[in-house]
Image (cartoon, rainbow, N blue to C red):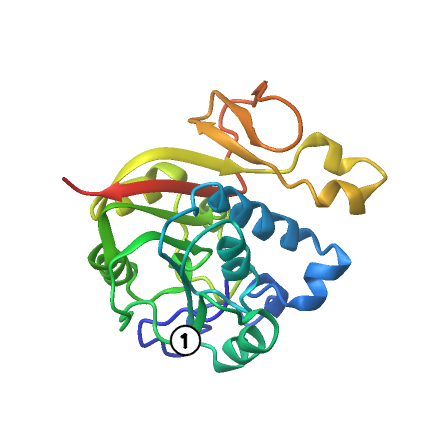
Amino acid sequence: MSGAGCDQPDQSRGRPKRRAPETLERIDLPQLTTGHPEAAFHLARYRFAAHLAAGRRTLDAACGVGYGTALLRAAGAPFCVGVDIAESAIRTAREHYASEGVQFVVDDVCRNRREGPFDLIVSFETIEHLVDPERALSSFARLLSPSGLFIVSTPGDEAAAWALGIRDNPYHRHAWYPDEFERLVARHFKVVSKYGQAWRPSCLRPRIRRAISRAWVLLWRGSAGYRDLVGPGPTTSASSPPGWLPHYTILVCEPLP
């Protein structure tokens, strides 16, 4: 996630003066090459989307420095457009990830002046930054082809912290519990599958650098349990304690009928 948009004014207004590190908001090239923990989460989401990218014209909304856009293209998307409101991020993307079939554009995700339709639209860690999330979702729905897929993610456990008055990230304007986020998205799309993302227990063991490269995407089944979806080895079942919230919520959607 990088710049978002929706004609946003100062994002820190009305929030605590303590500022979050900017690495929370954009994964840059150094984080990708040095095993930054959040980079593992971001890469896992893009690798999950890459399984669905082959043959699909793809829009990567709030693409940041473009590594995910390039990954989707390499997975078989015939054409990828990466959009970000941050000119510096797009300059980096063009310098490092421009190639045939990949285009990087400075634009506001709420306006999306691209010509659709797109068969796959991904927007990871964007929606919580926007002044008007509904406007962005309406824009994505307009650009999605009748048989297309929309994949969107947001922090899944931040709303619980907000309920306690803890707002550590001044860049975030909204926080939703997973069911709240689903209801928001369902006003514009048909939600066909729900996922959560969290660390595997192995990520707590000593060889942390190896572990963080395996930020797993887990199928969300409410608070009752999760099962592994992306990662080495067969799909297996795993339980989670009641009330457990995924670190990130991921929804896969289709156009409304």
- Snapshot quadrant of residue 216: top right
- For the point 42% across and 26% down, the residue is 222
Does residue 117 appear to the left or right of 2 in the view shown? left
Q: Secondary structure at mark 1?
A: strand
Is residue 212 found left or right of 146 in the rendered image? right
Image quadrant holding the C terminus, namely top left
For label 1, the residue is 105
Q: Is residue 9 left or right of residue 134?
A: right
* Position above or below: 46 against 64: above
Quick one: which residue is furthest to the left in this view?
257
In the depicted structure, whether residue 253 falls above or below residue 240? below
Q: Measured along the vertical axis of the image, is residue 191 above or below residue 159?
A: above
Is residue 79 rendered to the left or right of residue 22?
left
Q: Nearer the viewer, residue 7 or 102?
A: 102
> Is 36 drawn above or below residue 18 in the view shown?
above
Image quarter of residue 256 = top left
- The answer to whether residue 160 is visible is no
The image position of residue 213, as x and y in percent, is: 71, 45
6 or 118, nearer to the observer = 118
Question: Neighbour class for label 1 at 10 Å: few (<14), some, many (≥20)?
Answer: many
Question: What x and y, as percent, mark residue 178?
Answer: 40, 39
> How many numbered marks does the figure carry?
1
The spot of residue 238 in percent (x, y) is 58, 20
* Residue appearing at x 69%, y 51% in the figure: 37
Visible residue check, residue 220: yes
- For the point 57% across and 62% down, the residue is 67
Across and down, in percent, residue 143 comes to 24, 59
Residue flagged by tag 1: what amino acid is it? Val
